[in-house]
Image (cartoon, coloured by chain):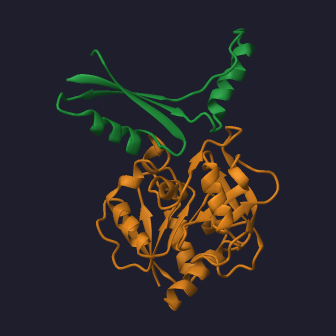
Chain colours: A green, B orange
């Protein structure tokens, strides 16, 4: 078994109102110096050893992310 | 006219959609998300709500439901399909319509009666409207911001595939004030506002939404 992490982020050109709301809240909470926040999703998959990279890419592209509005990355990490 | 109305776990507006079909002298046929056939219907409505709790993304899981595989196949052969609100999100996730619906730009859930202009009255669902007619129907959504890349927007505009546009202040940050679009063939339409809630002045702001279901009647009778 391996752990696979899929990160999904809104594309740079897509408005991210949730990230903006977080960014706008930080100065109110006394945290200065944060100029921008983008909010995405982080998936951790427990994956059998015979699942290849192409399959993982397909899972990310067709299901975990919507490529119209989101970019994604897949990486294998130490469990 | 037999019109299938799909119910997913979390669908809310299937009953109103069925009622709208009856108002247009059609017979509503309930379809369940796990169904593997469309029961011989002439058209399908994918209604609003929160299918599968909006988990992952709105419509992302519903798009893989067994009944949707049948809808995708039928739509690609020309069957009229209407997606309302969550139904529009599902049709976009299913790639029957381009683009995606995203969180409203001001983050608030918007619930109000909304003026729309009818930009295309040649689709399977809009022939009863006059060109550039303005209609008032409810809008109630938290993720109704229509997004698409520049090439897709240009294609939609150039090919007259924007079906409805918001009139007045943009309620959710949709690109080009887009409230509803159609596919190249004009049989699949998706919109965020709710025509099925505006079919009788007794229970809605107007009966402006009824035209969509009467348009379908014309389309089916003609076919």
**Which residue, as the protein is rendered here, is positioned at the far left?**
A50
Q: Is residue B145 visible?
A: no
**Residue visible at 59% across and 75% down in the picture:** B125
Residue A34, given in percent of the width and then of the height, sits at 68, 14
**Which residue, as the protein is rendered here, is positioned at the far bottom?**
B222
- Relative to B177, B100 lies left or right: left
Residue B7, given in percent of the width and then of the height, sits at 42, 61
Residue B139 occupies quadrant: bottom right
Instruction: In this rendered view, identify the residue nearer to me: A77 or B222.
Output: A77
Residue A65, given in percent of the width and then of the height, sits at 45, 40
B171 in relation to B107, above or below: below
Q: Is residue B159 visible?
A: yes
B78 in relation to A20, above or below: below
Instruction: In this rendered view, identify the residue nearer to me: B105 or B176.
Output: B176
**Residue visible at 40% across and 48% down in the picture:** B61
Residue A24, given in percent of the width and then of the height, sits at 72, 22
Residue B207 occupies quadrant: bottom right
A25 in relation to B60, above or below: above
**Residue visible at 47% across and 85% down in the picture:** B1
Number of on-image labels: 0
**Which residue, as the protein is rendered here, is positioned at the far right?**
B168
């Amino acid at each position: 078994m391996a752990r696979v992490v899929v990160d999904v982020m809104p594309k740079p050109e897509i408005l991210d109102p949730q990230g903006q709301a977080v960014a706008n809240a930080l100065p109110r909470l006394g945290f200065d110096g944060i100029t921008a926040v983008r909010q995405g999703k982080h998936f951790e998959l427990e994956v059998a050893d015979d699942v290849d990279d192409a399959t993982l890419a397909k899972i990310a592209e067709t299901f975990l992310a919507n490529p119209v509005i989101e970019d994604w990355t897949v990486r294998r990490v130490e469990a | 006219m037999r019109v299938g109305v799909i119910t997913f776990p979390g669908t809310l507006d299937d009953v109103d959609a069925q009622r709208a079909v009856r108002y247009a002298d059609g017979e509503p046929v309930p379809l369940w998300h796990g169904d593997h056939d469309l029961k011989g219907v002439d058209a399908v409505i994918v209604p609003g709500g929160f299918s599968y709790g909006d988990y992952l993304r709105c419509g992302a899981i519903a798009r893989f439901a067994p009944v949707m595989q049948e809808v995708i196949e039928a739509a690609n052969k020309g069957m009229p399909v209407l997606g309302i609100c969550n139904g529009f999100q599902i049709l976009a996730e299913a790639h029957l319509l381009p683009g995606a619906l995203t969180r409203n730009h001001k983050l608030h859930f918007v619930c109000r009666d909304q003026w729309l202009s009818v930009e295309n009255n040649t689709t399977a669902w809009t022939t009863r409207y006059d060109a550039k007619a303005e209609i008032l129907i409810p809008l109630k959504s938290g993720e109704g911001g229509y997004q698409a890349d520049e090439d897709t927007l240009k294609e939609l505009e150039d090919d007259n595939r924007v079906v409805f546009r918001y009139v007045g202040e943009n309620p959710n940050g949709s690109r080009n004030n887009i409230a509803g679009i159609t596919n190249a063939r004009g049989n699949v339409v998706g919109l965020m506002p709710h025509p099925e809630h505006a079919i009788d002045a007794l229970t809605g702001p107007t009966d402006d939404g009824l035209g969509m279901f009467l348009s379908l009647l014309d389309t089916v009778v003609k076919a």
